[in-house]
Image (tube, rainbow, N blue to C red):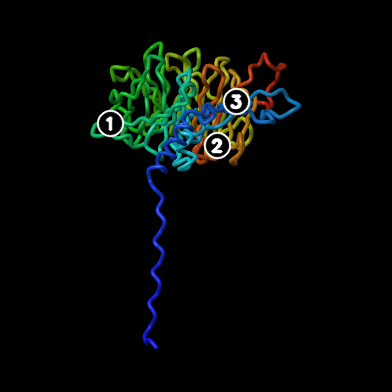
Amino acid sequence: MPTGNAPNPSPAAPHRLPRAPLCRAALAALAAGLLLPGCAKPAGVLFETADTLIVWPPPPDAPRVRYVGQLRSADDLRASRNALQELGRTVFGPGEPVGVLLGPIGVCTDNARRVFIADRAAGLVHVYDLDSRRYESLRPPAGEHTLFEPVSVAYDPAGRLFVSDPGAGVVHVFQDGGAYLGTLGDGQIARPVGLAFDAARQLLYIADPGDHRVVVLTMQDTVEASIGSRGSGPGQFNFPTFVSLGPDGRLFVADTLNCRVQVFGPDGAFERSVGSRGDLPGYFSQPKGLAVDAEGRLFVVDANFEAVQIFNEQGQLLMSFGQEGHGPGEFWLPVDLRIDESGRLWVADSYNRRVQVFEIIPPEATPAHEPTEPAPEEQTP
């Protein structure tokens, strides 16, 4: 009898499929997919209308403001994808989102198709093109300047974008297409924050809370005017943060720590103030971004109240909307707002990491409407 362990049978050799047929089959499937029109995805509806309209004030009052949508990243542009892009998403997944808002502080539009968002946390300016559905970002070229703290943006219809940078003490200037043109205000402004551009006079208005004033710069980088000084009297400021120009050339300044908005004539002379410190409608706690529409109505966002208040030309409160939260029309430390020529209101909702979009409903579209609250008496803190 034989002794010792019997040898184990040899394992069966693995069956190897020829690679060439598989590769050819995969390529054929890929080619077939690319040729199928149904594999591409058309552009989606931008700011798709919800089943239920969200409006302010709520019924039965006539609506004055309608919620439109929001921007959080380039995905919200809902761009079209060709068949190859769609196949890549199917095989590899959607990938990392592009153009994500991290800390949107300032917002403006070119009154046509593009939205510019200053993102302090990301250290750049987001550009969302609502027509082409394309996204790009703006920064100075490496080695020239650093965009330390982008806070506010203002657009010149001639094709320039101004970006305030209080961390660097300058205003950066970009040309359409993204070319970097340099800076304004170096050594002339302590902490540039809010911006407003007068295209007719080619003047840039800059809120400077570091020196408690508004600086007016020419495009030759010279100081045209300096408005205000520190204090609580008429025409004085306590940390002014944002500015806006009305259709008649009047200057509106968010005098933030004086809890009011001050109004100046086109010549820079003080005219009046709106609001004062308080926690009732028509008062302010921390007014910041502001804008004036074609009808002369003043829109002011209050970072502490988490709301937007709307005043008529006489400074009377018409209505307000918004509250703390994360849903449509709710805010978490809103900072800036702008109104474009189409009547859309863009609000930088910073801690919610988004820009919310609203539509101002024209007065002729609804019955006449009186102010919702009696305006508080104007006071000087």
Please say whether residue 108 is visible from this viewpoint: no
The tag earlier along the polypeptide, 1 or 3, is: 1
Disc 2 to disc 1, how far (Cα)? 39 Å
Q: Residue at x 39, y 80 (%)?
A: 6
| Secondary element at tag 3 | strand
Residue 325, given in percent of the width and then of the height, sits at: 60, 41
| Secondary element at tag 1 | loop
The front one of 271 and 176 is 176
The front one of 344 and 99 is 99
Question: Residue 141 has which mark?
Answer: 1
The tag earlier along the polypeptide, 2 or 3, is: 2
* As drawn, 180 above or below 324: above
The tag earlier along the polypeptide, 2 or 1, is: 1
Residue with the mark numbered 3: 310
Q: Is residue 283 left or right of residue 20?
A: right
Disc number lying in front (1 or 3): 1
Q: Farthest residue in the left direction? A: 143
The amino acid beneath tag 1 is Pro
The amino acid beneath tag 2 is Ser
Q: Quadrant of residue 219?
A: top left
Disc number lying in front (2 or 3): 3
| Secondary element at tag 2 | loop
Residue with the mark numbered 2: 285
Residue 358, given in percent of the width and then of the height, sits at: 58, 27
For the residues bearing labels 1 and 3, Cβ distance under 8 angstroms: no
* As drawn, 211 above or below 361: below
Residue 65, given in percent of the width and then of the height, sits at: 63, 25
Q: Is residue 125 left or right of residue 42?
A: left
The front one of 18 and 143 is 18
The front one of 364 and 372 is 364
